[in-house]
Image (cartoon, coloured by chain):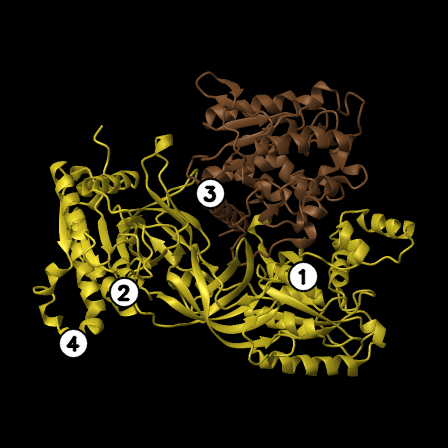
Amino acid sequence: MSENKQEQMNIVFAGHVDHGKSTVVGRLLADTHSLPEGKLEAIKQNCHRNSKPFEYAFLIDALKDEQSQGITIDAARVFFKTEKRNYVIIDAPGHIEFLKNMVTGASRAEAAILVIDAEEGVKENSKRHGYMISMLRIRQLLVVVNKMDLVAYKQEIFDKITTEYSSFLKEIKLTPEGFIPLSGMKGDSVANLGHNMPWYQGPSLLQALDQFSLEADRSNKAFRMPVQDIYKFTKFGDSRRVIVGTIESGRVKLGDKILFYPSGKKTRVKTIESFNSQRKTEVSAGHACGLTMEDQIYITRGEMAVLENEKQPAVSSSIKVNLFWLSRTPMTKGREYHLKSGTAKIACRIDKIIRVIDASTLNPLNDKDQIDRHDVAECVLKLKKPLAFDLAEEIAQTSRFVIVDEYEIAGGGIIREEIKDAQSDIRNKVFLRNFKWEKSFISPHTRARRYNQKSTLILITGLKDIGKKEVAKKLEEDLFHEGKFVYFLGIGNLLYGLDADIKDKGAKEKNRPEHIRRLAEVAHILMDAGVILIVTAVELAQDDLEIIKTVVDPAFTEVIWLGEEVTTDISFDYQYAGLEEKDILVEKIKESLIEKGVIFHPW
Amino acid sequence: MDHLDQLENISVHIFREAYANFKNLCMLWSIGKDSTVLLWLARKAFLGHVPFPLVHVDTRYKIPEMIEYRDRLAAEWNLNMLYGTNEEAIAAKQTFPDGNVDRISCCKNLKTTALKNTLSGQGKRYRFNHEKGKYEVDKNTEPFTGVIVGVRSDEEGSRSKERYFSPRDRSNEWDVGNQPPEFWSQYKTDFAPGTHLRIHPLLDWTELNIWEYIKRENIPTVSLYYDQGEGKRYRSLGCYPCTFPIESNSRNVDEIIEELQSGKLKNIAERSGRAQDKEDGGLETLRRNGYM
């Protein structure tokens, strides 16, 4: 029988330091004859040579550092098989210093074995690891009470630990598969029950492993595929434009209507691409796939593909999360981090810390203004751009994130709640607009080729009377005479027509977002027509720009600040401070448009 | 989806993450079975293409058939093929076959140092010119910041502790005790200037998986892996002075799979034919200092 037809399962061994995880694993390997012949003897000899007692843990702690310190530093992977299936056993370190390695190991597991020392009883990392197992959403947990030989195999001790730890698990809403009294050193209840605990009827650890169930099929949930990349290997003579990504849940087939979030763009699946395999008509969860689309839509890494006729993901730049912190440098308010979820990577800050708790006691740490190493917290994060996600209860895979501090992954967590941000309403209008949009036979790509330009919104802003309109009109005129399809639009041109219904002097500030939204919608139409649109507006702020970028494609928007003094918080692409001759200024702007590929050198 | 499919998909995902995050990416190709499967998986990930250079460390003691095979596939598969050599050590005869240094030091000179210098661009790189059909000194000397490597966690103890994305400091060293966390398919893709990352898409594969995949995909391999009628074959390939064949009658992929499944080789480590592993400290010492 071929190995790859067999079931495979990852199992993590967790628990407090020195409670004997590696010993239990080592014993399991030895008693099931899973070790290369001679390995056991070699390690025994080595121990003898260095006059230290042999331990089964040495089999696992193969690294020299670990043998000399007697603790597991990293989560080693060990391969092991039973009649029923193949296992990858991940032996996670119990020392608090190495919680990040425990998380690394445990996150790959479908089931967890938590080891508690019968003599020492429940310790802080027994609880902390239990908490992490619940946070990482490992569905199956088995508790092993080890070192029963040191307590004379007494049932009372086993019962006491079982009661104490059960009540802890209840608090964090985890239901264990069972508790097993065991001795890794002597071998009781590992592969066989042995005779020392007649009061225990089984199962043995080995039997209990085989009783774990495999993960439920993720293909039946809604389709989710974070976009990893867009491939066009023209250099190799390949004209396919392939959107690649690994399907986190659900399935997709040829002809399906597909949407990308947060942009809300829509198209259909044309082909499913692969190398050296049969043409597929459908792919499902777990596949790292490649899709081509019917339309040449512009999307980038970080968007999430979903199907039109299924549950839509949440999109927001404000999220309520549960997170755990692993870095020595605490997570603090005011500092900028990066959140990575799926393939998206977005700058973020703590907006609010709701509560911080000590995962080893479940006690709240009151009035904490920062999240320290190994703390667990509930907080609100503010993201610089919107993220598409699901809630942890719905689709676990697309609710997960990590936090990067400078170059390091410093923490992780799950999204519990979507909080409406300032653009939520506008974004919903845009999504609806995109769904309902009637596409013409001429694609944006075809238009761009005809006009020899990339349809773009050029926003010129700055102080009043600084000369924005003159520059804009001169730029329009120049481009027009060069044969470009270009249009100038002052924001004031909308006021008495399109905006007549909301032009109320008293409500100027209140209606500002709607004015901006309408301007952006006009821009969207003109850009769809293939135009280079030049818009002028006085002192645009970042909030205004956020609205514009929600409505039109941010990849085709260029912001120019005119003048030396910057009076708003807007982030612009170019600033022209020196107010030189208009002609020179216009030339400079054209140069940057060439650089960005909006227009091309005529030679 | 069977287990081989799962392994393939995870590897493809890792390849694509690497390609999306690193500007100066390369992949080490030792010509052995693992890195050739790795190369095949790259073609899966990039739909028939390999959009980054392949780097081979040529110790000049490689079995000749390996070099022929390398250049044949480089031409057939349109690969951007580079190699580097520690020419100084060879000229100064600082090698084990010359009798001047022990095996471990020879590995350090001809592999570790050659690798470091080839990756950093300080050493000469030779690039395969497809039009002329020969190697030329490469003008590009930019350092590689992401290096894809075909190590597997079942090969040996220290490799079982690796990350998929594993940082190396400025001097190429591996800090085993302080590795970054890696969970939920989120890898360390940010790195400080001067440091780089090793990327390990094959970490979860076993020796048996490799052969099963070679069979399923019909991947070409060198004949050294098969018994040519003398009752011996190579199980792991390296330099000829330090690599020895094992006793085996497997003449093709099917027979190797059968041999591995039968448990005949269960008690023999895969790298048992590699003499440098047996010296004090062995592979772990080599790896800490930048060896693959």
State yes or no: discs 1 and 3 in contact (Cβ < 8 Å): no
Count of picture labels: 4
Disc 1 marks which amino acid?
Answer: Phe
Q: CA distance from mark 2 to mark 4?
A: 27 Å
Q: CA distance from mark 4 to mark 1?
A: 61 Å
Q: CA distance from mark 1 to mark 2?
A: 43 Å
Where is residue B60 drawn, in percent x and y?
66, 22
When asked about the image quadrant of residue A589, the answer is: top left
Q: Secondary structure at mark 2?
A: helix
Indicate which disc residue A506 carries.
Answer: 4
Q: Evaluate whether label 3 is on the same chain as label 2.
A: no
Q: Which residue is mark 2?
A: A427
Q: Secondary structure at mark 1?
A: helix
State yes or no: discs 3 and 2 in contact (Cβ < 8 Å): no
Where is residue B29 drawn, in percent x and y?
57, 33
Q: Secondary structure at mark 4?
A: helix
Q: Secondary structure at mark 3?
A: helix
State yes or no: discs 1 and 2 in contact (Cβ < 8 Å): no
Disc 3 marks which amino acid?
Answer: Tyr
Q: CA distance from mark 1 to mark 3?
A: 30 Å
Q: Which residue is mark 3?
A: B19
**Within-10-Å neighbours for mark 2: few <14, some 14–19, many 20+:** many
Indicate which disc residue A98 carries.
Answer: 1
Q: Residue at x 75, y 54 (%)?
A: A61
Q: Which chain is yellow?
A: A
Q: Earlier in the sequence, mark 2 or mark 4?
A: 2
Q: Residue at x 77, y 40 (%)?
A: B282
Q: Chain of mark 4?
A: A
Q: CA distance from mark 3 to mark 2?
A: 31 Å
Q: CA distance from mark 3 to mark 4?
A: 54 Å
